[in-house]
Image (cartoon, rainbow, N blue to C red):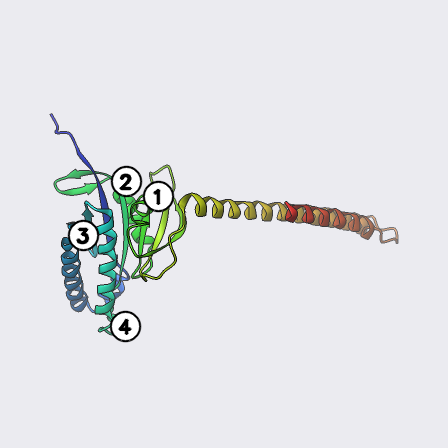
Amino acid sequence: MASPIERKLTTIFSADVVGYGRLMGQDEGGTLATLKTYREVMAGLIAGRRGRVVNTAGDSLLAEFPSVVQAVECAVDVQREVGERNAALPEDRQMWFRIGINLGDVMVHESDLHGDSVNVAARLQALADPGGILISGPVFEQVRNKLALGFDYLGPISVKNIAADVPIYRVLLKPDAAPPPEIDRAAPTTDKSASKSGTRQHRLYVSAATAGTFIALLFAINIFSWDGELWFQWPTLAILFVFCLRVIRLYRA
């Protein structure tokens, strides 16, 4: 009988090198040496925050933390340390990382982690800026009032095989950054405004296309039934008047 799958709630830390293929193409030996050094630095910082390196496949690194706060603090430590070390390298030899952090339930198999929560962390990492950190909504809720950092709400993203969209935040590494926005205030307002604007533009395009079609049809009828009189401009004026009223109503709504 198969043993039951072990599950646990943990904080997933996903990191990956930016432009690794390009770096390898320029200098394989130097790139591997830099990656090895940076991984050792990251492993030390992770251990110092009571985290655990789960695996280091390819140019990526996956770790977990029992504390959400320490996971985010570690990510900040990593990006600052990497930035300082990169400053001593030529620009084309600098190695930058993207980091994504998520909090969720995972499956544990032979010390490795599996499940949707791991996929979300990897998705956040892929969307982060070079040298940047993205965190999910659950992580933000745990750290928003505990760290001297700012957070920029970027909106929800869709993740493969996950029904609900995941709200994401960019970590602002400067301590004096603006305070974090409220999820329940900032997010719905932004989404609602964008949706309303998109609907208004769609209706405007439909109205313009309809008016244009009628005008073209009237012009064609006038030309192909030509009897020496040009008359299509008069009904065209009426159509344009109705279209203008429609535009006014749309932008007053």
Quadrant where the C terminus sits is: top right
Element marked by disc 4: helix
The correct choice, above or below, for 239 with respect to 172 in the image is: above
Give amino acid for label 2.
Asp
Work out which residue is located at the far top of the displayed protein and give it: 1
- Identified at 27% across, 55% down, the residue is 99
Q: Is mark 1 on a helix, strand or loop?
A: loop
Q: Do the residues labelled 2 and 1 touch (CB within 8 Å)?
A: yes
Q: Mark 2 or mark 1: which comes first in sequence?
A: 2
Instruction: Confirm or deny contact between disc 2 and disc 3 (CB under 8 A).
Output: no
Amino acid marked by disc 4? Glu
The answer to whether mark 4 and mark 2 are in CB contact below 8 A is: no
Q: Where is residue 201 in the image (x, y as percent from the top left)?
A: 59, 49
Query: Which label's residue is closer to the chain start, 2 or 3?
Result: 3
Determine which of the numbered discs, if any, sits on residue 116 in the image: 2
Give the CA separation, mark 2 to mark 1: 9 Å
> 42 or 218, which is in the foreground?
42
Per the model, the C-alpha gap separating discs 1 and 4 is: 33 Å
Instruction: Identify whether 89 is placed above or below 54.
Output: below
User: Residue at left 32%, top 47%?
Assistant: 140
First reached walking from the N terminus: tag 4 or tag 2: 4
For label 4, the residue is: 91
Q: Nearer the viewer, mark 3 or mark 4?
A: 4
Q: Distance between the residues labelled 2 and 3?
A: 18 Å
